[in-house]
Amino acid sequence: GSRRNVGDDARIDLYFPEHCNGQMVMITPGGGYEHLSTYNEGVYGAKWLTERGIAACVLKYRMPNKHTTVPLDDLQNAMRYLRYHAKEWGVRQIGVMGGSAGGHLSSSASTMYVDQITRPDFAVLLYPRISLYKGESTSTKNCLIGRDEEWADRPEEHAALLKKYSPDTHISSNTPPTLIVLSVDDDSVNPRNSLPYYTRLTECGVPV
């Protein structure tokens, strides 16, 4: 259930209930941007959703390897495909759901969309890694941007990237309604990492 080498075989897997209630969720598995937890943060979620009448799409996106735009490019291209076929599937709403680094990707999709086609209708963020901080060493940040020491001679560029890829800095009143699920005893992703995102959503009047 863990995939690391996702290259040209990046793909989406579609799951449909017997009777769709009009909603679809694109699931973005976590794995620190170094691998994809395709079962426990992908297939199992799709099964849970389809049992409740919700269509699902598991996105098997490419690992960034410091190519910062890659995961979001894959998500937005997948969203374009889902929107194009939504009517024939009986889908009216398409949201995103992701845990850990997948939560970072889903929150990026919610705040860095390029048009209404790529904007999710809602977001579910499960123990997401959202804000990227200088001095904090996490797989999500290191695989997306690189370690802090790699940027020692380019501090301004580094600071700009940390801000750009911290989705809480892009929230507006048009950010989609969001459910954030956290656990106080999470020793992998500190729940406090999500608080700036939550706070900014409330400031902008976004249901959260």
Image (cartoon, grey):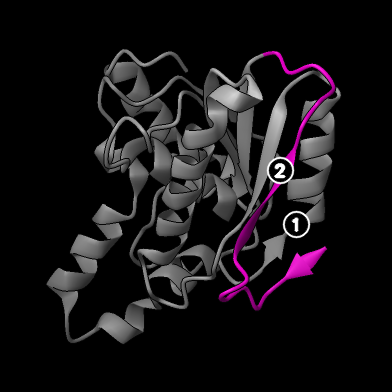
Mark 2 surroundings within 10 Å by alpha-carbon count, few (fewer than 14), some (14 through 19), many (20 or more): some
* The disc label shown at residue 72, or none: none
Query: Tag 2, which secondary structure?
Result: strand
The image quadrant that residue 114 belongs to is top left
Based on the picture, tell me whether residue 22 belongs to the magenta stretch: no
The image quadrant that residue 120 belongs to is top left
Q: Which residue is mark 1?
A: 38
- Residue type, mark 2 in image: Leu
Q: Percent from the top left, x then y, of residue 168?
A: 33, 39
User: In the picture shown, does residue 119 fall above or below 133?
Assistant: above
User: In the picture shown, does residue 133 fall above or below 53?
Assistant: below
Q: Percent from the top left, x then y, of residue 189?
A: 60, 51
- Residue type, mark 1 in image: Thr
Question: In the depicted view, which residue is nearer to us: 156 or 39?
Answer: 39
- Let me know if residue 93 appears in the view: yes
* The disc label shown at residue 14, or none: 2
Quarter of the image for the N terminus: give it.
Answer: bottom right
Question: In the depicted view, which residue is nearer to us: 106 or 21?
Answer: 21
Query: Tag 1, which secondary structure?
Result: loop
Mark 1 surroundings within 10 Å by alpha-carbon count, few (fewer than 14), some (14 through 19), many (20 or more): many
Going from N to C along the chain, the mark reached first, 1 or 2, is: 2
Residue range of the region highlighted in magenta in the rendering: 1-21
Task: Pick out the residue farthest to the left.
Answer: 156
Residue at the spot x=55%, y=34% of the render?
85
- Let me know if residue 126 appears in the view: no
